[in-house]
Image (tube, rainbow, N blue to C red):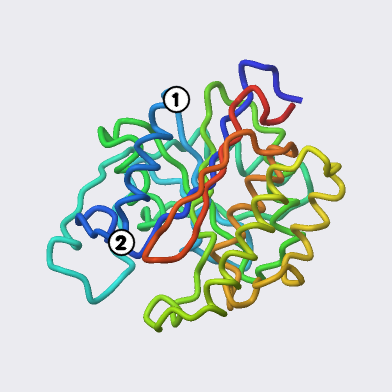
């Protein structure tokens, strides 16, 4: 088990709609404020491992480049969206440590020396650490989108020995694209609120055992409002990896409104993560 000095901070963020949090969009004001609040609570990490909802591969894949380019993996936004800069370096030594931790747990992984950083990385990090001076490594989801397998990926990463690491799960606790553009109804508000209440309880309740908490996350589609909030689960699964690492109730949840939908973020400080 990692020594206390090597315990990571673990953070799941709802990263919003494409580059809009960086463009002054009023529907993202609470997101920007929340990430700035969280930034004030975080120690400055020596490196950041990011699990982004915007990268799926048949095997967990890891960026290995020393200076990955940015991938502007969105369309239909203003021209300035495609000139955003976030020149954070890669960290091949951390990438190798991630690969080794997965391999030692029997999880086949892949090294990718050519892939860049997608907006699941540079949008939240530009708000959390705007200097772009912290080395980053990005880890993909598995394209089978298995909740149990993503919990297992997180559990494997508990074996990482890396001083002062931040693990960032970059997704969105609400991700129904049609609902963002549809008129609000009593039913849609109820389904959104019901799932957020369930997710908050699942992540924070000290009354749950860790076995019970993991079971709830594995069977998340049975939660109230689950498939309304997540017709496809890729934006939820970075949370599963985060919990697989932390394996403890979240001490600092954040509730907010993004694009008129209730959403949440969850922080496991280093004192709790891998406890």
Instruction: Give 69 or 224, whichever is nearer the viewer.
Output: 224
Label disc, if present, on residue 27 of the rendered structure? 2
Q: Rate crowding at label 1 as few (under 14), some (14 to 19) or many (20 or more) other CA atoms within 10 Å.
A: some
Quadrant hosting residue 237: bottom right
Marks 1 and 2 close (CB-CB < 8 Å): no
Q: CA distance from mark 1 to mark 2?
A: 32 Å
| Residue at screen point 73% across, 52% down | 151
| Residue at screen point 74% across, 59% down | 149
When the figure is inspected, residue 62 is found, relative to residue 11, above or below; the finding is below
> Could you tell whether 110 is left or right of 170 in the image?
right
Instruction: Give 104 or 72, whichever is nearer the viewer.
Output: 72
Whichever of callouts 1 and 2 sits on the residue coming sooner in the sequence is 2
Mark 1, secondary structure of its residue: loop
Q: Rate crowding at label 2 as few (under 14), some (14 to 19) or many (20 or more) other CA atoms within 10 Å.
A: some
| Residue at screen point 66% across, 53% down | 240
Residue 228 rendering spot, x and y as whole percentages: 59, 77
Q: Which residue is mark 1?
A: 46
Residue 57 rendering spot, x and y as whole percentages: 57, 66
| Residue at screen point 62% across, 68% down | 58
How many callouts does the rendering have? 2
Residue 94 rendering spot, x and y as whole percentages: 52, 35
Residue ranking furthest to the left: 79
């Amino acid at each position: 088990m990692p020594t206390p000095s090597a315990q990571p901070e673990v953070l799941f963020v709802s990263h919003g709609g494409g580059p809009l949090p960086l463009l002054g969009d009023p529907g993202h004001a609470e997101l920007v404020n929340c990430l700035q609040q969280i930034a004030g609570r975080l120690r400055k990490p020596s490196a950041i491992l990011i699990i982004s909802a915007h990268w799926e591969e048949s095997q967990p894949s890891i960026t290995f480049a020393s200076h990955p380019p940015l991938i502007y993996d969105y369309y239909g936004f203003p021209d300035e969206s495609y000139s955003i800069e976030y020149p954070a370096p890669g960290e091949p030594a951390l990438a190798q440590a991630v690969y080794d931790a997965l391999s030692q747990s029997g999880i086949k992984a892949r090294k990718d020396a050519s892939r860049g950083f997608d907006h699941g990385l540079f949008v939240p990090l530009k708000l959390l650490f705007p200097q772009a001076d912290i080395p980053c490594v990005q880890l993909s989801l598995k394209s089978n989108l298995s909740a149990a397998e993503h919990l297992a990926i997180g559990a494997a990463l508990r074996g990482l020995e890396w001083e002062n690491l931040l693990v960032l799960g970059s997704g969105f606790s609400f991700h129904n694209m049609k609902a963002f553009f549809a008129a609000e109804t009593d039913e849609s508000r109820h389904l959104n609120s019901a799932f957020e209440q369930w997710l908050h309880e699942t992540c924070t309740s000290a009354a749950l055992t860790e076995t019970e908490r993991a079971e709830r996350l594995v069977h998340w589609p049975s939660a109230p409002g689950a498939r309304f909030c997540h017709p496809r689960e890729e934006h939820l699964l970075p949370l599963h990896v985060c919990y697989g690492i932390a394996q403890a109730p979240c001490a600092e949840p954040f509730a907010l409104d993004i694009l008129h939908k209730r959403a949440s973020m969850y922080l496991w400080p280093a004192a709790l993560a891998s406890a």
